Amino acid sequence: MLPFALAGVRRVVLFGAHPDDIEIGAGGLLLSLAGPLDVRYVLLSGTPDRQAEARAAAAAFLPGARITFDLHDLPDGRGPAHWDRAKDIVQAAAAGGADLVVAPARDDAHQDHRLLAELVPTAFRDAVVLHYEIPKWDGDCGRRNVYVPLPDERARRKVELLHANFPSQKDRDWWDDEVFLGLARLRGMECRSRYAEAYTCEKAVISL
């Protein structure tokens, strides 16, 4: 296993199909990013109340970053039927370029997540793209090839912020500390850390 660093990351584009996708999948990574950041935060769907939660969460997970929100209202669960609009959204987000792009995974069982996963690499040709995972009843958390180790306090801070910023989700039977920390503990074991987030990177360019 060869560690590598995302040095010099300043422009970040975050994609989620729904409010809370980004923070569940990549909240630990967001808390780990350092330095001045320009962040474009893109959601395909969400009611006004849920999008307000997302705005607050982004500010909490990315303190000090300059965040541009690009929030849309595609019907939840019907993303593929709005392919043209989703493509335009992704293409517009790519116009400003990026050092790092974070998006759902291609093997995600939710059709809205898969749509984003398929579109993002077609628009971002020269940025690192990390595809995150989201635990859910589909049981689709598979093999990953990129890990972000998380110190204990950062993993727990992620969970604390999820609870604080997405109160609308607290009654869901899968929304609890054991799910979030359990997956982080498993991914941590896989990379010789206590906790970690795991991603898929399908293509990378190495400078020697």
Image (cartoon, rainbow, N blue to C red):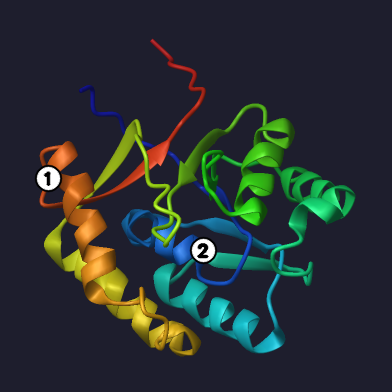
Q: Is residue 95 above or below residue 17?
A: above
Q: Earlier in the sequence, mark 1 or mark 2?
A: 2
Q: Is residue 192 above or below residue 22?
A: above
Real-space CA distance between mark 1 and mark 2, rounded to the nearest whole angstrom: 24 Å
Q: Is residue 171 above or below residue 7?
A: below
Crowd class of label 1 (few under 14; some 14 to 19; many from 20; radius 10 Å)? some
- Determine which of the numbered discs, if any, sits on residue 58 in the image: none
Q: Residue furthest front?
A: 138
**Residue in the image at 17% along x and 38% along y:** 190
**Amino acid on which disc 1 is placed:** Ser
52 relative position to 154: left or right:
right
Residue 35 percent location from the top left of the image? 40, 55
Q: Which residue is mark 1?
A: 193
Residue 139 percent location from the top left of the image? 39, 52
**Residue in the image at 49% along x and 18% along y:** 205
Residue 165 percent location from the top left of the image? 44, 84
Crowd class of label 2 (few under 14; some 14 to 19; many from 20; radius 10 Å)? many
Q: Quadrant of the N terminus?
A: top left
Q: Is residue 170 above or below residue 97?
A: below
Number of the front mark, 1 or 2 = 2
**Residue in the image at 67% along x and 34% along y:** 124
Q: State the image quarter where residue 61 is shown.
A: bottom left
Q: Quadrant of the C terminus?
A: top left
**Residue in the image at 76% along x and 61% along y:** 78
Q: Which residue is mark 2?
A: 21
Residue 56 percent location from the top left of the image? 52, 82
**Amino acid on which disc 2 is placed:** Asp
Provide the secondary structure element on which disc 2 rests: helix
